[in-house]
Every structure is written in structure tokens, then in C-alpha cells.
Image (cartoon, rainbow, N blue to C red):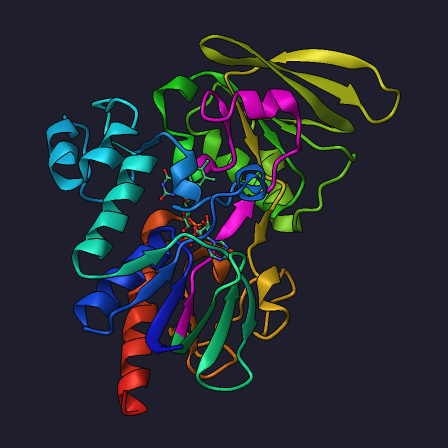
Amino acid sequence: MATEKVIIIGSGPAGWAAAIYTARAELAPLVLEGAITETNRMAGTLPLGQLNLTTEVENYPGFPAGDMAPYLDNALPGPVRALMPPHSHHGISGPELMELMRQQAKNFGTRVVTDDVVEVDFSRRPFTLRTLGKHTYSAEAVIVATGARANYLGLESEDAYKNRGVSACAVCDGALPRFRNRPLVVVGGGDSAVEEATYLSKFASRVHLVHRRDTLRASKIMAERLHANRKIKPEWNHQLTEVLGDDTGVNGVKLTSTVDGSTRQVEAAGVFLAIGHTPNTAFLGGQLELTEKNYIRWTVPFRTNTSVEGVFAAGDVADDYYRQAITAAGSGCQSALDAERWLSHCGH
Ligand SMILES: Cc1cc2nc3c(=O)[nH]c(=O)nc-3n(C[C@H](O)[C@H](O)[C@H](O)COP(=O)(O)OP(=O)(O)OC[C@H]3O[C@@H](n4cnc5c(N)ncnc54)[C@H](O)[C@@H]3O)c2cc1C
């Protein structure tokens, strides 16, 4: 088995940015992009990452609204392009952006394997990685860019309206025209739920914050911010039990009281889940130091180093704060530069 200089695990913006930089630095990266399995489909962890699950992306610099179709025809191989939905003229879509990143990495010689890493051995160098497809890979340096998946309630109706009013990212989707001056629902009771509700209150006519208890888990300062915001209406002691809608998307929700089981309907053009994220770190088997929320811990300030020398982490798998495509791509770039300098320091 030949030893790779660098293997990148993961295929979101962080992974492809790391691949572009390491490929251009002549490190001949290998990307293990994830497997196409029913388990990954259900978990939202298919190759190309979280952005591949969304429609319009309006905040990734360099892609204003316009007719991208001729460029996509030109930049992507025919068979890939043929599988993509028609371009919306609105800006770039998540799947388009991710296919372009993947292709850009391939243009510089990145090799891509469609498989999940299921086990790692970081106890000695070169490092060893085992995949679902029962292949073993060896590498001097590893960049982990496996992302974090948004948690959903698991309702069938929620799944049916994803991208048609149901979202897990207010910063990403809140400014879309469909939500402006309309009532919205946020589900959750922690700091991020209050943050999402506060952010959405800039665009919405009203934000219903649905929480199954009668007090927030959020910090005191966030709770005060919530109470001071007259556009946010807490719906204490309620659970969202059904997303309602029609062909055009979400038009309401059904709430069920956690006190007496009674139900009522609330009008809403959108539902934003703010019930946390799950970082994709289980396959590491505890070999990297994690935070209390199971994200990979960056061990050197402003660097992408992890607790194991030669293993770097990039994107949402280590960042539970910014969680944006541009920040993930930025830390992918950092991880590539960190890996390249470390490899060169080691004489590779
Ligand atoms: C609905 C939604 C809309 C969004 N909209 C926007 C937006 O408009 N603008 C924006 O900037 N951000 C948006 N985001 C956030 C953005 O998608 C993420 O911040 C970004 O994708 C994180 O990139 P990443 O590379 O760290 O990880 P991810 O994009 O999560 O990619 C990681 C991928 O790695 C692969 N992987 C995981 N485990 C393994 C393994 N064991 N082996 C091999 N491969 C593995 C999987 O394919 C996984 O999907 C949105 C997120 C969601 C959920």
C-alpha cells in the first residue's frame, strides 16, 4: 500500500478548499468524499456536504444573481451537468457551487474516492484509514473535514417541506424573499434558537419561538434579548408536531401543548430548526481530542492543528460557531497550508 502525502476526509467546502490548495502545492491529495448510502441519505451526510442539501446560496462571494447556465455547461463535465436541475437565474444553488468546487479540485489533479472512512489509526505515522468499502489507506498527513449535520425533529411533513420553507439555518435562508414580512416559526430553547429568532425578526412580520418547556435553556443575556424583542412571541410548553403546507411550500404549523396535549394551528411561511448540530466525529473512535459537544478541538490558536501532530481539522467539524460555507472553505485553506508547512518541516 503506497503512502499518500495527504488525505482529506470529507467533501463540503472545507474539504474541497483543502484539496485545491494541497493539489496546487503538488501534494497530490486524495479525497475520501463519503459514500452514497441510504444511511448517509437519511442522515444528510451524502457526498458534497450540507450545501448540497439547499437551494439558493446568496452569500458566497463571487456568485451574484445572473445566468450561470452557460458557465456551468462549460465548467462541468456533461454527465455531471446533465443530472443537475435547471439553473434558477437567482444566484448559485448549493449543488451547483459544490460541483464547481469538486471539479476545481479535480482540475488540479485531486483524486476522489466515493467511500466513508469508518475507522482511523492515528497512534503511529503514517496514519491508517479504513473505509466502508473495506479499503485501507495510509497517509503522512490527514485533514478531517467531515462537517456537522443539522438536527431535525424527524417528522415526515418536515422532510417533505425541506427547502420549501423548512430550514436549519436562519443566517443562510432568512433573507430569502419567501420569508420577508411573513410570520415564521423557530423551534428550540437554547442560545442558538434565540439568535436565530432575533436574526429572523429583521425580516419576518412575527417570529413564534416554540419551546417545549416554560423557560429557556438560553443564557440570561439571550433571554433578556428575547423578551425585549416585540416581534418574537414565545410559544411556551409547545411542540411542533406537523408542518402544514401546499404546493407552494409551508403555510403553517401544528403545535401540541406539552401540558394538556391540546393542539392548535399557527400561520407561518417558514420553519427554522434550532435544536443543535451533530458533528461527524464518531468514526474517529476517540483518537482526537473533542470538545464537550463532540466537535474536534483545535489545539493551537488561529491554526487547524488537532491533538495529534500531522492531523488537521477544517470546517464545521471543528467550528460550532460560524457554520458557513465561506468560513468552512477558509479553514479548509488554512488546514492545507498548515499541513503543507508541517509536511515540509518533516522533510516530505
Ligand atoms: C439547509 C442549509 C442551508 C445552508 N445554506 C447556506 C448558505 O446559504 N450559505 C452558507 O454559507 N452556508 C449555508 N449552510 C451552511 C453550510 O452548508 C455549512 O457551513 C458548510 O457546508 C460546512 O462545510 P464543511 O465542509 O465543514 O462540511 P459539510 O458541508 O457538512 O461536508 C462534510 C461532508 O463530508 C462527508 N463525510 C462525513 N463523514 C465522512 C466520513 N466518515 N468519511 C468520508 N466522508 C465523510 C459527507 O459527505 C459530509 O456531507 C447551510 C446549511 C444548511 C443545513
> In the image, is residue 199 above or below residue 139?
above
Residue 301 in sight from this viewpoint: no
Residue 256's quadrant in the figure? top right
Residue 343 in sight from this viewpoint: yes
Asked if the stretch drawn in magenta spans residue 166, the answer is yes
The x, y position of residue 325, in whole percent, is 35, 48
> In the image, is residue 137 above or below residue 197?
below
Q: Residue at x 38, y 51 (%)?
A: 12
Q: Is residue 84 left or right of residue 132?
A: left
Quarter in which the N terminus is drawn: bottom left
> In the image, is residue 297 above or below residue 272?
below
Residue 243's quadrant in the figure? top right
Q: Is residue 195 left or right of residue 80?
A: right
The x, y position of residue 266, in whole percent, is 64, 13
Asked if the stretch drawn in magenta spans residue 177, the answer is no
The x, y position of residue 200, in whole percent, is 47, 31
Front position in the image: 64 or 311: 311
The span shown in magenta is 142-170
Quarter in which the C terminus is drawn: bottom left
The x, y position of residue 28, in whole percent, is 24, 70
Front position in the image: 159 or 199: 159
